[in-house]
């Protein structure tokens, strides 16, 4: 199931970052930056590379995904030598992380000992490098099929996913949801939101409201039908007015 889903995502995926028009890239980045530059965080449930591409292409300094490199030859560097770094591994900057992939994403791999992010190398596009790893039976971190409990079990058994989920459980203020309708298999995310709404009640450091974008009347009816599952105030807005890509 995981292999077929990854193949489906990659087959429909743009080949490289520059297939996203420049004006759309800038527009999306501007939308995200309004949150990131004001102590906000971005949580994604998408598997694709679009969020990663947009942030990297626009040289965002406030988008921190927790990955970093260690200098391998500090002595040589102090003597004027060329710096050499190890692989791009997660954990070095997790305490200041602002971007979280709740269900995993194409460029993030669990090697068994480390959480590693695939990079541009050997003059190849990122997606091509990912596909080559998949051909060798190395698969990205993905939370795939299953109900909410099964997804949560998968999350708890991966330290990167578990960390991201715990961060969602500890957000405060307001949460804005775009392109996500809280379907029948997303109960675990509603539970995380409810945990955030109950924490720090005395200090005020808790989640007070969630804004959910809808595209149609059926979307609106669905949110109304599940509104009682949320322990915080639920607001609905017309997602078509967000104009993220233009």
Image: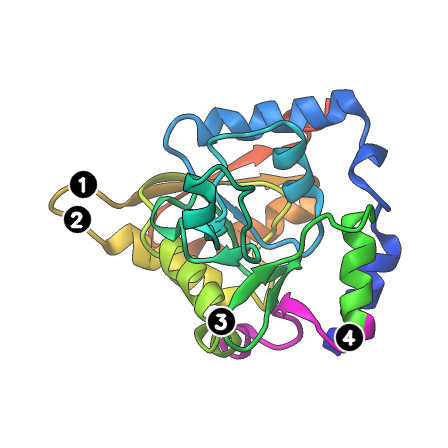
Of the image marks 4 and 1, the number of the one nearer the N terminus? 4
What residue is disc 4 on?
3
Q: Nearer the viewer, residue 22 or 1?
A: 22
| Residue at the image position 36 percent from the left and 32 percent from the top | 39
Which one is in front in this view, the residue at disc 3 or the one at disc 2? 3
Which one is in front in this view, the residue at disc 4 or the one at disc 1? 4
- Give x and y (percent) for residue 211: 48, 39
What residue is disc 2 on?
201
Q: Dot 2 lies on which element?
A: loop
Q: Are marks 4 and 3 in contact (CB under 8 Å)?
A: no
Of the image marks 3 and 2, the number of the one nearer the N terminus? 3
Q: Is residue 3 above or below residue 170?
A: below
Q: Are marks 1 and 2 in contact (CB under 8 Å)?
A: yes
- Give x and y (percent) for residue 209: 37, 41
What residue is disc 1 on?
204
| CA neighbours of label 3 inside 10 A, class few (<14), some (14 to 19), many (20+) | many
What residue is disc 3 on?
155
Which one is in front in this view, the residue at disc 1 or the one at disc 3? 3
Q: Is residue 44 above or below residue 1?
A: above
Q: Are marks 1 and 3 in contact (CB under 8 Å)?
A: no
Of the image marks 4 and 2, the number of the one nearer the N terminus? 4
- Give x and y (percent) for residue 222: 60, 53
Q: Is residue 127 above or below residue 144?
A: above
| Residue at the image position 46 percent from the left and 50 percent from the top | 71
């Amino acid at each position: 199931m995981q292999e077929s889903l990854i193949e489906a995502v990659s087959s429909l995926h743009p080949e490289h970052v520059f297939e996203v028009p420049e004006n759309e890239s800038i527009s999306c980045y501007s939308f995200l930056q309004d949150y990131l530059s004001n102590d906000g965080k971005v949580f994604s449930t998408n598997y694709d590379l679009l969020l990663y591409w947009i942030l990297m292409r626009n040289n965002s300094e406030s988008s921190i995904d927790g990955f970093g490199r260690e200098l391998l030859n500090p002595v040589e560097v102090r003597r004027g030598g060329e710096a050499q770094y190890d692989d791009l591994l997660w954990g070095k900057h997790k305490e200041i992380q602002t971007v979280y992939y709740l269900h995993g994403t194409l460029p993030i791999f669990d090697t068994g000992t480390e959480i590693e992010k695939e990079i541009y190398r050997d003059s190849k596009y990122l997606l091509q490098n990912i596909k080559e790893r998949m051909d060798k039976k190395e698969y990205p971190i993905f939370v795939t099929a299953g109900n909410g409990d099964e997804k949560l079990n998968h999350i708890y058994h991966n330290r990167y996913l578990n960390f991201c989920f715990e961060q969602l459980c500890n957000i405060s203020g307001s949460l804005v949801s775009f392109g996500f309708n809280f379907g029948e298999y997303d109960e675990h995310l509603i539970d995380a939101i409810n945990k955030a709404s109950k924490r720090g009640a005395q200090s005020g450091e808790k989640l007070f409201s969630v804004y959910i974008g809808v595209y149609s009347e059926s979307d609106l009816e669905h949110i109304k039908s599940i509104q009682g599952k949320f322990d915080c105030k639920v607001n609905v807005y017309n997602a078509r007015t967000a104009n993220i890509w233009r």
